[in-house]
Amino acid sequence: MKRSSVEIITEWDIVAARQLGRNEAKKAGFGTVDQARITTAISELARNIYLYAGKGRIEIERVTDGGKDGIKVVASDEGPGIPDLRKVMEDGFSTSGGLGAGMPGVKRLMDEFKVISEPNNGTTITATKWLH
Amino acid sequence: MPQVVGKQYKEILKKYLESHSEEDLYVGQQFSRRFIEKEIAPEDVISIHKTALLELHPELQDEVWDSLDFLIEMMIHYGFTLRERQSLIRKQEIIQMEMNVATKVQNTLLKTESPIVEGLDVGWISEPARQMNGDYVHFINREHESSVAVADVMGKGIPAALCMSMIKFGMDGLVGENSNPGKALSTINRIVEKSVDDSMFISMFYGKYNSENKMFSYASAGHEPAWHFSNETGTFLELDAKGLLLGVKVDSVYEERSVYMQEGDFIVMMTDGVTETRTEEGFIEMKEIQNLLLEVKEKSASQIAEHVYNNLTEAQNHRLSDDFTIVIFKKK
């Protein structure tokens, strides 16, 4: 399947990642609201890379699974990693400062969500949304 | 389901656009509850609005549609903040359920039976300010003796309650021994010193009535003084004895004193939830509490305790600012 990516180094790259995500979501057939959700999720993931890892990459891929179509977003970086994943996934953690909209927010915007993070070895977040 | 909601929304919007009436706005307000019930996100509400408007007035300018798309973008964050809040409320409900169970466990664990000893009428009330109680009353009965421990853990809520459970085990150990108040407090003090965190302070008043010699003996670990009401003179005498708070020093010594109880006399033991009752005019005066006691001095010990409790909670608009405990030993 078609896969495209944006390197995140400056804040402008966040905008580029958003644009790519929105175009792909539209092409995949998502409605306005879901396009906005996918774009916001990408925006938050890209912003986390920019703020906490310095640089990384957002990859966007159209996927199918047993007749279902969807969009998969992979955010990866080689930053410091997330020391306490459970804490980061907790509701309320984001609002007390730190990770912007937070991981739980991104998780809610998408259908599937997976984080792999090792201290000093970077973080990879995979989030997928399916067409309903 | 959203399609059904969308259709209904369109009808309500259509009517309003024609009538501009308050009645239709009211219908709209009622309908908005359904959005909330069905947990429809704000961004979806705008999308429903846009779809409805597009069907009713397709002739509108592009700026209108574009601005609604913009508004959807604006609402995404609101949407997940709302969802986060809903999830926190659910979490809170779970904690509340656990609290209810914990309270039941505490009540079972700290259950104590009022003593029955010849010539003595006992009444008491212990009410937590929040759900769990940091005050503690424990009675120990022997043939001619009735002992009571009134304790107060500084602080409120769960930490205080957990700490109280520990005291309970210390008290249980006393049942077998023939302890006098001073000795009882040193025993409990050693247990507390060993097992309780340094930041926890516990005060305790320990009293014992002997029906053979009609003496009330007592000791105090930094607790509120008790009062002895003399029926003969109609006055209150403060009962205080030297002794450090529990758990401060392992070898603390507790002074023991005693008073003779005549007919109609009573002893009032309290925690600071009683003496430091705060009303709108500030802390309540000792004198006011003593006046309350005088009003019902002829009544039973339980009625005296209830009278004080009812009046002091009323003075605080039925909200307790601290755990509230009062124990009355009345000589019949």
Image (cartoon, coloured by chain):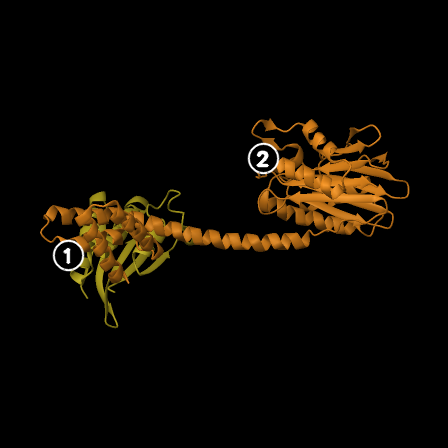
Task: Residue A38: tell me if it is visible.
Answer: yes
Q: Judging from the image, what is the letter of the chain drawn in yellow?
A: A
Q: Which chain is indicated by disc 1?
A: B
In x, y percent, where is residue B201? 66, 38
Label 2 element class: loop
Gap between marks 1 and 2 measured at Cα = 59 Å
Query: Crowding at label 1, few (<14), some or many (≥20) Cα neighbours within 10 Å?
Result: few
Residue that label 1 marks: B55
A107 relative to B20, above or below = below
Assign the C terminus of chain A to one quadrant of the image. Answer: bottom left
* Residue occupying image coordinates x 68% and y 47%: B195
| Number of numbered discs | 2
Residue at 33% x, 59% y: name it. A113
Check the image and report above or below for A19 versus A69: above
In which quadrant is the N terminus of chain A drawn?
A: bottom left
Image position, residue B259 (x, y; %): 85, 34
Q: Quadrant of residue B238?
A: top right
Chain (orange): B
Disc ID at residue B316: 2
- Which quadrant would residue B243 be assigned to in this image? top right
Secondary structure at badge 1 equals: helix
